[in-house]
Amino acid sequence: MKRLLAASLLAGLMMAGTASAATENRIGTVDLQRAVTESKEGSVARADLLKKTEQLNAELRGQLADAEKVRAELEKESGKLSVDERAEKQRLLQKKMRDFQNRQREAQEEIKQAESDSIRKIIAKFGVILEKLGADGDYSAILDRNSGVFYAGKKTDVTPLLVKQADQEYQR
């Protein structure tokens, strides 16, 4: 009785395996970089980033103009200034240039971080959309053309097979 039950269970599993092997896997691809560029949200994010860049550049131009003004005064008045006054102007110029360079680095980091944050936010939204598209469109997988799998349906999960094979090879 147990053998008959085991044989019928094995036959059922083999038929289910054959039936699932016959189903067609539907795989989609997506170019996320292009999607970000072409989407409305991506365009808005790009415009916001450009606006922020212009604001920071205006601030940096102001700081650089201040430093150049001190440099021009130093060159113009260098013969008239005492040693102490000249040294003070040079220290002021060096400080203004350091402040400018520091702010320039900070501005570059701000822009880089803002760009990264906006892309991450958009990609997260796209991930939710792609998951729904994948499920609704009966895709087995949706792959990002630039980086890899973005959505994988349950039919494509080979993790149990991998674990089984790895366990078998480990025992050898």
Image: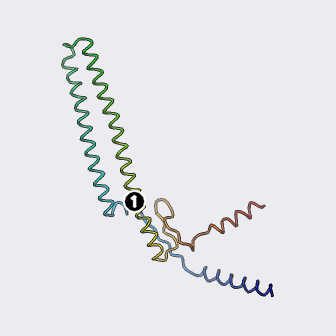
Q: Quadrant of the C terminus?
A: bottom right
In x, y percent, where is residue 135? 48, 74
Looking at the image, which residue sits at the far top?
82
The percent coordinates of residue 18 (x first, y second) are: 64, 82
Would residue 31 be found to the left or right of residue 83 on screen? right
Sort mark 1 into few (<14), some (14-19) or many (20+) by Cα contacts within 10 Å.
Answer: some
Q: Is residue 24 left or right of residue 103?
A: right
Seen in the picture, residue 156 relative to 55 is either above or below; the reply is below
Find disc 1 in the rendering and name its residue.
Answer: 33
The way the protein has been coloured in the rendering is rainbow
Position in image of residue 165 (x %, y %)? 70, 66
Q: How many marks?
A: 1
Answer left or right for 159 relative to 74.
Answer: right
| Residue at (31, 55) in percent of width and height | 46
Q: Secondary structure at mark 1?
A: helix
Q: Residue at left 48%, top 59%?
A: 147
Q: Nearer the viewer, residue 39 or 8?
A: 8
In the rendered view, would you say 162 is above or below 113?
below
Q: Quadrant of residue 100?
A: top left
| On screen, residue 95 above or below 145 | above
Q: In the image, what residue type sits under mark 1?
A: Gln
Instruction: Kindly identify the residue that appears in the image at 56 percent across and 72 percent down.
Output: 154
Toward which corner of the image does residue 107 lie, by quadrant? top left
Q: Position of residue 126 (x, y in %)?
A: 41, 64
Which residue lies at the image location 62% right of the left edge and 66% below the top edge? 159
